[in-house]
Image (cartoon, rainbow, N blue to C red):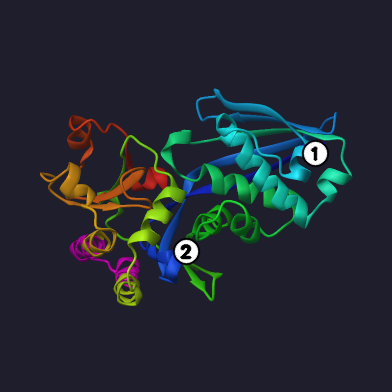
């Protein structure tokens, strides 16, 4: 019997990096996500096939049950297989029945967004596996891939959320986020995917005492969540960029790439890649296309 699961993708609007240290973060689930289907098979193995949004196969392999049980690791050319084994091994430690009481599986994953967009290929997979095996997704993430977990909260919720780590445990609050100026908000893809693991490691290397920054970001998050004034919203996201630029010792994306843009631009998630959020009086699509960034998505086409 086929089992099917789905998880939402994610965008982190405020609190990138500092969410790891307890800052309040505003995060939004996207209209894009990932499907997972499981059917019984044979040979004490998992026949794994992953499809990109265009229907092409971006990963295909067979993972033996014994590799999962023993957490077998292969050379660097098999990095995706190694990651899958790591996730499945942690799942096995929590719920061994899916290995010990099965003869095999045929597993198919299907993204509804292009894999390189960075909307949560890993988090949607982890949440789908957790749903399938009825285990805690946050524990599975913590023991395998790592990260704050806000992306799992987006995978599980169909509304905007405020996400915070309190005593290293996730606290998720559903909120309403529908400012009257949504038609002025666009998401622009920066043509390259950032590694969350690498970005987090870099943040910790540069991080100084962060308490003051957390208070600043918390206040900005409240402003962004509650304001009805597009100018106040723009000022808040600009202030966020300036503060994180100081912490990360990096140029803002506007300084680096779009210094002549008539509006405000905010990085989302790992700086230097994935999507940015823009607010401007005029539709910015032609501007970004002229700069070589053709993927410009209106807010309402991206966010649930």
Residue toward you, 193 or 65: 65
Residue toward you, 201 or 215: 201
Q: What element does badge 2 sit on? A: strand
| Spatial CA span between label 2 and label 1 | 39 Å
Residue 300 magenta: no
Q: Residue at 85%, 29% (x, y): give it.
A: 43
x, y percent for residue 205 = 37, 60
**Part of the protein shown in magenta:** 220-240
Q: Residue at 35%, 77% (x, y): give it.
A: 211
In the image, which disc is placed on residue 247? none
Q: Residues within 10 Å of mark 2 (few under 14, many from 20)?
A: many
| Main secondary structure type of the part rendered in magenta | helix
Q: Quadrant of the N terminus?
A: top right
Q: Is residue 302 left or right of residue 169?
A: left
Q: Is residue 291 left or right of residue 121?
A: left
Residue toward you, 101 or 109: 101
* Tag count: 2
Q: Residues within 10 Å of mark 1 (few under 14, many from 20)?
A: few
Let me know if residue 13 appears in the view: no
Give the quarter of the image for residue 27. Answer: bottom left
Residue toward you, 59 or 261: 59
Q: Earlier in the sequence, mark 2 or mark 1?
A: 1
x, y percent for residue 65 = 79, 38
Q: What element does badge 1 sit on? A: helix
In the image, which disc is placed on residue 66? 1
The residue pinned by badge 2 equals: 161
x, y percent for residue 62 = 72, 28
| Up/down of 300 relative to 42, above or below | below
């Amino acid at each position: 019997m086929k089992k099917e699961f789905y998880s939402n993708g994610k965008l982190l609007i405020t609190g990138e990096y500092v969410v790891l240290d307890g800052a309040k973060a505003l995060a939004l689930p996207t209209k894009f996500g990932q499907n997972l289907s499981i059917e019984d098979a044979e040979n004490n193995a998992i026949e794994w096939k992953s499809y990109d949004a265009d229907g092409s196969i971006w990963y295909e392999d067979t993972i033996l049950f014994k590799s999962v049980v023993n957490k077998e690791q292969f050379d660097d050319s098999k990095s995706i297989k190694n990651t899958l084994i790591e996730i499945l091994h942690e799942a096995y430690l929590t719920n061994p029945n899916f290995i010990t009481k099965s003869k095999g599986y045929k597993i198919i994953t299907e993204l509804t967004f292009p894999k390189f967009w960075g909307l949560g290929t890993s988090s949607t997979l982890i949440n789908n596996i957790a749903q399938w095996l009825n285990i805690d997704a946050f524990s599975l993430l913590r023991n395998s891939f790592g990260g704050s977990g806000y992306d799992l909260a987006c995978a599980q919720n169909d509304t905007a959320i405020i996400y915070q780590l309190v005593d290293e445990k996730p606290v998720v609050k559903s909120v309403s986020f529908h400012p009257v100026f949504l038609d002025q908000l666009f998401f622009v893809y920066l043509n390259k995917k950032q590694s969350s693991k690498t970005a987090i490691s870099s943040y910790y290397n540069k991080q100084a005492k962060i308490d003051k920054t957390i208070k600043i970001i918390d206040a900005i998050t409240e402003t962004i969540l509650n304001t009805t004034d597009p100018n106040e919203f723009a000022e808040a996201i600009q202030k966020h960029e300036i503060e994180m630029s100081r912490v990360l010792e990096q140029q803002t994306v506007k300084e680096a790439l779009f210094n002549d843009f008539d509006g405000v631009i905010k990085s989302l998630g790992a700086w230097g890649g994935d999507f940015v959020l823009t607010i401007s009086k005029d539709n910015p699509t032609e501007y970004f296309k002229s700069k070589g960034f053709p993927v410009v998505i209106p807010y309402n086409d991206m966010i649930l």
